């Protein structure tokens, strides 16, 4: 079984494993597929559908990224192994329903989930709230939108292959996505003034308290985006009540209105609809915050917590409990979760990698018609593929030599920077300094940071996008 690290972290973690598989698929796709299936086998997956989070606490919850990883591994392998995709899909159907039934306490499609792999990213321990009540999490809700999209894409691939009818399951996940988007839009998690999503704490007394921390928690909803082909769209509008109602409430129940909003493109017979949790207006606001160099954008990727909090620590005072959080670009100064993983400023590859992938997906829909200022405040307008490429290059630059022959990952360690015996022995660390890209955390962590190999191959056009693979399956099946 693939571990985060054979020395410092010799144990499995569910969402780490998913990212391992995407990197491993480039060298051993059979092993990568085996890993994803293994976690869904009877001796790992609970009969109720829950997947174990990590070795010391099976019942905790990690972000549900297995469906996304399965689709990516399937695509990297050439999009041929329909049996693998079908097998993992069946088990993830059970897991998806477990999430819907257990992690949505109020039944309003605003999800909980606890720390969700982000350790100390909030001022409070999100798995064990010191004040009681319920924490409605923008990241958990965003992850569920992301999960629904990935499952819908797998169902579409299976259906297009003509080896397994699955049009009703495509519709099922469009319906779920519509409900999640509706909840995210209406339940008070979006802050119009700040242009970010925030968690919301519902206290035992019933008060709703927004947790206004500028972190990746508020960015994750932007990861949930997909392009729906015309046949699936037509079927959903005719059969799917929740999806059709969502478009109706937003005044988008006619193709002309969808085109005016900019979310329907193409000629009749080949039309495509962009589904996203954010919507075009909120996406622009959110990306403006994300690509501000005084906030999230660093020379070597995206910080997990905005540098805004360097000079503006956030303090929450609720139900007699006070807690605070500030920007810490290197190691953590809080003992939360053992104090050995820090999401309060460093660069972490998994979320940065997903953002690069999401930007590319948005560009494949909008093309050159959608531009943003990048970096924010620079006055330079770029298309989203150029933004994705620059962000990928920033991440890759952690390991490559700069004009002075230095590697950011080695930081101020003189021997690693200057000794020929060490200089080319790269370290794939757990996370990286939010300001200078130095490797910190677990130093032999060759787990999810290994997705840098996938980024490099994609920058050279050597990997076909999963969406293109799904479309190609349909074309080949009709021939």
Image (cartoon, rainbow, N blue to C red):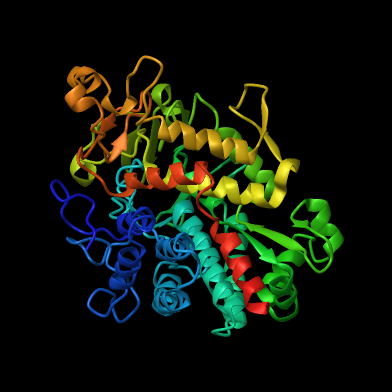
Q: Nearer the viewer, residue 315 or 67?
A: 67
**Residue lying furthest right:** 256
354 versus 437 height, above or below? below
Relative to residue 459, is residue 424 drawn left or right? left
Q: How many marks?
A: 0
- Quadrant of the image for the C terminus? bottom right
Percent x, y of residue 239: 71, 81
- Quadrant of the image for the N terminus? bottom left
Q: Is residue 189 among the parts visible in the rendering?
A: no
Q: Is residue 418 among the parts visible in the rendering?
A: yes
Residue plotted at (79% across, 52% down):
261
Q: Nearer the viewer, residue 441 or 58?
A: 441
Residue plotted at (63% across, 44% down):
283
Q: Nearer the viewer, residue 59 or 110?
A: 59
Quarter occupied by residue 465 = bottom right
Percent x, y of residue 190: 58, 47
262 versus 109 height, above or below? above
Relative to residue 226, is residue 11 drawn left or right? left
309 versus 45 height, above or below? above
Percent x, y of residue 406: 32, 19
Residue plotted at (68% across, 78% down):
478
**Residue lying furthest top:** 404
Percent x, y of residue 207: 47, 52
Residue plotted at (29% across, 75% down):
45
């Amino acid at each position: 079984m693939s571990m985060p690290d054979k020395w410092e972290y010799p144990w499995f973690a569910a969402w780490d494993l998913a990212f391992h598989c995407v990197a491993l698929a480039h060298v051993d796709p059979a092993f990568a597929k085996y890993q994803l299936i293994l976690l869904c086998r009877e001796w790992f997956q609970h009969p109720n559908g829950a997947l174990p989070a990590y070795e010391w606490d099976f019942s905790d919850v990690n972000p549900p990224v297995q469906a996304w990883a399965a689709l990516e591994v399937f695509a990297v392998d050439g999009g041929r192994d329909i049996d693998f995709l079908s097998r993992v899909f069946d088990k993830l159907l059970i897991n998806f329903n477990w999430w819907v039934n257990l992690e949505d306490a109020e039944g309003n499609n605003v999800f909980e989930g606890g720390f969700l792999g982000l350790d100390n990213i909030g001022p409070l321990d999100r798995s064990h709230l010191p004040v009681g009540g319920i924490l409605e999490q923008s990241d958990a809700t965003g992850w569920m939108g992301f999960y629904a999209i990935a499952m819908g894409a797998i169902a579409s691939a299976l259906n297009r292959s003509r080896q397994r009818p699955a049009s009703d399951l495509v519709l099922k996940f469009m319906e779920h996505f519509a409900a999640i988007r509706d909840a995210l839009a209406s339940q008070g998690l979006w802050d119009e003034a700040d242009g970010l999503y925030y968690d919301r704490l519902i206290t035992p007394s019933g008060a709703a308290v927004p947790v206004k921390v500028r972190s990746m928690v508020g960015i994750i909803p932007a990861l949930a985006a997909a392009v729906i082909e015309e046949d699936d769209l037509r079927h959903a509008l005719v059969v799917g009540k929740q999806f059709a109602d969502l478009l109706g409430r937003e005044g988008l129940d006619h193709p002309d209105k969808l085109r005016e909003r900019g979310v329907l493109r193409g000629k009749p017979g080949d039309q495509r609809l962009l589904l996203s949790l954010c919507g075009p207006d909120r996406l622009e606001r959110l990306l403006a915050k994300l690509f501000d160099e005084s906030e999230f954008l660093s020379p070597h990727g995206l910080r997990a917590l905005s540098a805004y909090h360097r000079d503006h620590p956030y303090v929450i005072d609720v139900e007699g409990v006070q807690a605070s959080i500030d920007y810490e670009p290197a190691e953590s100064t809080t003992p939360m979760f053992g104090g050995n993983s820090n999401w309060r400023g460093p660069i972490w590859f998994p979320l940065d990698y997903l953002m690069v992938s999401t930007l590319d997906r948005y560009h494949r829909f909008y093309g050159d018609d959608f531009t943003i200022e990048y970096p924010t405040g620079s006055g330079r307008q770029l298309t989203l593929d150029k933004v994705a490429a620059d962000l990928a290059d920033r991440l890759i630059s952690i390991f490559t030599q700069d004009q002075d022959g230095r590697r950011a990952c080695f930081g101020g360690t003189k021997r690693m920077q200057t000794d020929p015996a060490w200089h080319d022995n790269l370290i794939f660390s757990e996370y990286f300094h939010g300001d200078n890209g130095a490797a910190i955390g677990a130093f032999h962590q060759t787990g999810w940071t290994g997705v840098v190999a996938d980024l490099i191959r994609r920058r050279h056009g050597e990997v076909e996008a999963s969406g293109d693979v799904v479309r190609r399956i349909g074309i080949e099946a009709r021939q």
